[in-house]
Amino acid sequence: MFTKLKRALARFQKDQRGSITIESVIGLPVIMQGVVGGYGVFDMHRAATLNVKATEIVGDILSRETGVITPAYLAAMHSTFNLLAKAEPGSALRVSVLRWDAPTSTFVAEWSRSTSEDTGAISAAHLATLATELPAQPNYGRIIYVETWSPFTPAIRVLAQGVAGVNNGTIHNATFFTPRFTPQLQWSGG
């Protein structure tokens, strides 16, 4: 029995005649997986790029602000982010004004507010890591640190994890700006 099977496989291996049907059945699934997988990776990169651009725009708007930031203003910035990033429900925006303290070589949060209870204000542990991630500032120099989180559901599930900042279904971006027209961005309200 095995010898017959072995001979049949050997004949099939040596046979050089081709059939477009058999070759299509073998090759088409591989080609389709490549096309669909490529679209899935492209979709992740597209969403991540939209989020980066939207975060940068919100940060730039805040850096040019001369008035005070209120909860309503922060909610409007969150809506602007959602519109620009085409974000799914559940996104969040956190704005923090950080002051560099040269004697301790750390950033101190002057104020930090978030549109989501899940993210909350910036933590002391996060502030400690920012001293190595953000550029050096003059003593008492201030920066506006903007972070966004946006849930991402891929149109097509692919095996690529961590592509362009997409981790566990959430796109996280952080950027910083120096205030442009005033020495500090002020918070007013709760």
Image (cartoon, helix red, strand yellow):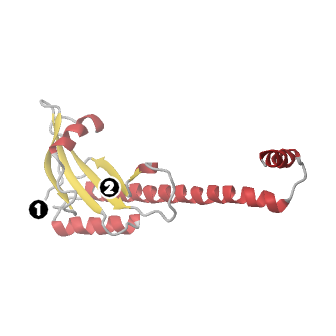
Give the residue at the far front of this rendering: 1
**34 to the left or right of 52:** right
Name the kind of residue labelled 2 in the image: Asp
In this view, the residue in front, 168 or 16, is 16
Mark drawn on residue 47: none
Residue 180 in view here: no
Disc 1: which residue: 188
User: In which quadrant is the C terminus drawn?
Assistant: bottom left
The residue under the point 11% across, 62% down is 188
In the image, taking residue 111 as reference, residue 91 lies left or right, namely right
**Coordinates of residue 109 in the picture (x, y in percent):** 15, 46
Circle 2: element type: helix
State the SS at label 1: loop
Label 2 neighbourhood size at 10 Å, few (<14), some (14-19), many (20+)? some
Q: Label 1 near label 2: C-beta < 8 Å?
A: no
Identify the residue shown where x is 87% and y is 55%: 18
- Decide if residue 16 is on the left or right side of residue 62: right
Residue at image coords 53%, 55%: 41
Mark 1 is surrounded, within 10 Å at the Cα level, by few (under 14), some (14 to 19) or many (20 or more) other residues, namely few
Direction left: furthest residue = 190
Which amino acid lies under the numbered mark 1 shown in the image of this protein? Ser
Q: Position of residue 113 (x, y in %)?
A: 17, 58
Q: Nearer the viewer, residue 143 or 49?
A: 49
Q: Nearer the viewer, residue 24 or 179?
A: 24
Residue 166 visible in the picture: yes
From the image, tell me which residue sits under label 2. Answer: 60
Give the residue drawn at x 16%, y 35%: 139
| Nearest to N terminus: mark 2 or mark 1 | 2
Q: In the image, is residue 95 above or below residue 136?
A: below
